[in-house]
Amino acid sequence: MPRYFFSTTNGHVTRDEEGQELLDAAEAQDMAVRYLGEILHNSAPSLAVGESYELQVADEFGRALYTLTVVATIAPTTPNAPAANDR
């Protein structure tokens, strides 16, 4: 089975040196979405406005196959729009 590597960037790069054997690139993409979801769940309070978090999937040859990027932003306010906690 091919090996895929899941590296992250959030102010610094953390390279996945071990990787994981998966059936194919589609399974690696699915795992990337779940993995980034777990990371965000555990670190959401420390993700400041303007910061980003990136997860990149590479194959065993070092080719980048898939990248997920999350950027924390503040939504612009709309006059007369109810606040999120008023809904």
Image (tube, rainbow, N blue to C red):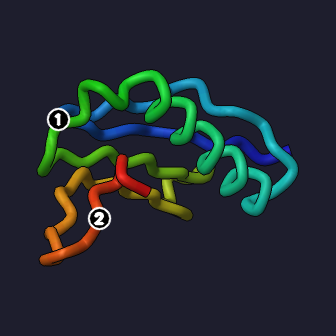
Residue type of the residue flagged with mark 1: Gly
Which quadrant holds residue 77? bottom left
Residue 84 position within the rendered picture, expressed as x and y whole percent measured from the top left: 34, 54
For numbered disc 1, what is the local secondary structure?
loop
| Identity of the residue drawn at 24% across and 26% down | 46
**Within 10 Å of the Cα at label 2, are there few (<14), some (14-19), or many (20+) other Cα atoms?**
few
In this figure, which residue is indicated by the disc labeled 2? Answer: 82
Residue 10 position within the rendered picture, expressed as x and y whole percent measured from the top left: 25, 37
Horizontally, residue 5 falls left or right of residue 27, namely left
| Identity of the residue drawn at 44% across and 38% down | 7
Q: CA distance from mark 2 to mark 1?
A: 34 Å
Does 62 sit above or below residue 43? below
Residue 22 position within the rendered picture, expressed as x and y whole percent measured from the top left: 81, 43
Quarter holding the C terminus? bottom left
For numbered disc 2, what is the local secondary structure?
loop
Quarter holding the N terminus? top right
Horizontally, residue 34 falls left or right of residue 10, namely right
Horizontally, residue 6 falls left or right of residue 52, namely right
In this figure, which residue is indicated by the disc labeled 1? Answer: 11
Q: Point out the tag, 2 or 1, that comes first from the N-terminus.
A: 1
Front residue of this view, candidates 49 and 53: 49
| Identity of the residue drawn at 16% across and 37% down | 48
Residue type of the residue flagged with mark 2: Pro
Mark 2 vs mark 1: in front: 2
Residue 42 position within the rendered picture, expressed as x and y whole percent measured from the top left: 46, 22
| Identity of the residue drawn at 24% across and 51% down | 72
Does 17 sit above or below residue 85? above
